[in-house]
Image: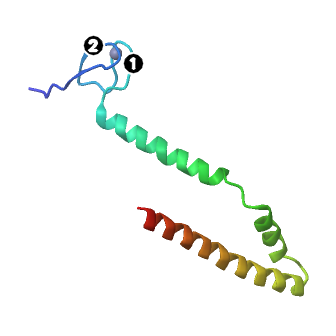
């Protein structure tokens, strides 16, 4: 005897047996699978968003000059980069603090 899992299609109302997709209209009807797919989609969107965010012009400028062939310029930009990094870290901390206070 096999386990029968009947799911009513929310789209067309057809009762499906042991199926992840409605046999009539093809709508995804397995709630677990649907949730998994939505989670995957959300993660993918989040990743795409992070990758799409370009570094600031200033950040790019610093990054480029950190690899400069002149040691003085390189050291100078590494110093600037260090300060910039600390400023960014403090900014992130303040943002986090505001979020924590507002919550
Ligand atoms: Zn259907």
| Ligand 1 visible in quadrant | top left
Q: Which numbered disc, 2 or 1, marks the residue closer to the eye?
A: 2
Front-most of residues 5 and 103: 103
Front-most of residues 18 and 75: 75
Q: Earlier in the sequence, mark 2 or mark 1?
A: 2
The mark found on residue 14 in the picture is: 2
Q: In the picture shown, does residue 57 fall above or below 63?
A: above
Instruction: Specify whether 61 is left or right of 1.
Output: right
Instruction: Specify whether 91 is left or right of 28.
Output: right
Label 1 residue near ligand 1, CB within 8 Å: yes
Residue that appears at 52% across and 46% down: 44
Front-most of residues 40 and 95: 95
Q: In the picture shown, does residue 68 fall above or below 33?
A: below
Q: Where is residue 66 in the image (x, y as percent from the top left)?
A: 80, 76
Q: According to the image, label 1 marks what residue?
A: 26
Q: In the picture shown, does residue 22 fall above or below 61?
A: above
- The Cα atoms of the two marked residues, 2 and 1, are separated by 11 Å
Q: Position of residue 64 (x, y in %)?
A: 82, 69
Q: Where is residue 5 in the image (x, y as percent from the top left)?
A: 18, 26
């Amino acid at each position: 005897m096999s386990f029968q899992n009947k799911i009513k299609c929310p789209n067309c109302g057809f009762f499906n047996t042991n199926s992840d997709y409605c046999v009539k209209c093809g709508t995804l009807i397995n709630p677990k699978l649907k949730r998994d797919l939505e989670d995957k989609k959300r993660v993918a969107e989040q990743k795409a968003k992070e990758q799409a965010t370009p570094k600031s012009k200033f950040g790019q400028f610093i990054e480029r000059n950190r690899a400069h062939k002149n040691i003085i310029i390189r050291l100078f930009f590494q110093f600037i980069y260090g300060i910039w990094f600390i400023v960014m870290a403090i900014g992130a901390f303040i943002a986090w603090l505001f979020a924590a206070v507002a919550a």
